[in-house]
Amino acid sequence: PQPVPAPAPVRREPLFLQRVRPAIRGELIAVNAELHYIRVHTVHGSDLIHHQFGAAVAELGDMGVQIHRSWWVSATAARRYSGGDRPML
């Protein structure tokens, strides 16, 4: 019998994206904190929703990188990332 390939991991859309207006939903680019809200940036525009920034970053997991205390950027949207003492995106 031939080995069965392992199924590809399923990437579930973060729950907070359900609060984004349907016209704005799409590929996620970045999220930034604005007081008690987060601004969600997608390829279709941006929307401001009531959600904690830390909770959003936790939901996103390894899909990107938090580049500042108030900004998270998708790994697919970043052209280049270099770590070290002073990380640059």
Image: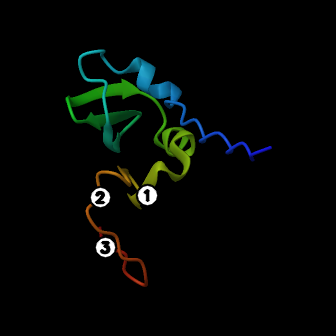
Labels 1, 2: front one: 2
Residue at numbered disc 1: 65
Q: Amino acid at mark 3?
A: Met
Tell me what residue is drawn at x 51 percent, y 43 percent.
60
Kindly indicate whether the residue at mark 2 contacts the one at mark 1 (C-beta within 8 angstroms).
yes
Circle 3 sits on which residue?
Answer: 88
Please provide percent x and percent y for residue 57. Answer: 50, 45
- Dividing the picture into quadrants, the one containing residue 45 is top left
Q: Secondary structure at mark 1?
A: strand
Dot 3 lies on which element?
loop
- How crowded pointer 3 is (Cα within 10 Å; few <14, some 14-19, many 20+) is rated as few
In space, the residues marked 3 and 2 are separated at their CA atoms by: 10 Å
Residue found at x 23% / y 17%: 23
Q: Closest to the observer: 5 or 62?
A: 5
Where residue 83 sits in the image (x, y, percent)?
41, 77
User: What residue type is disc 2 on?
Assistant: Ala
Q: How many marks?
A: 3
The residue labelled by disc 2 is 78
Instruction: Identify the amino acid type marked 1.
Output: Val
**Of label 3 and label 2, which has the lower sequence position?**
2
Looking at the image, is 42 positioned above or below residue 66? above
* Left or right: where 4 falls relative to 21: right
Position of residue 63 measured from the top left corner of the image (x, y, whole percent)? 47, 49
* Position of the C terminus by quadrant: bottom left
Q: Residue furthest front?
A: 1
Image: 1 above or below 75: above
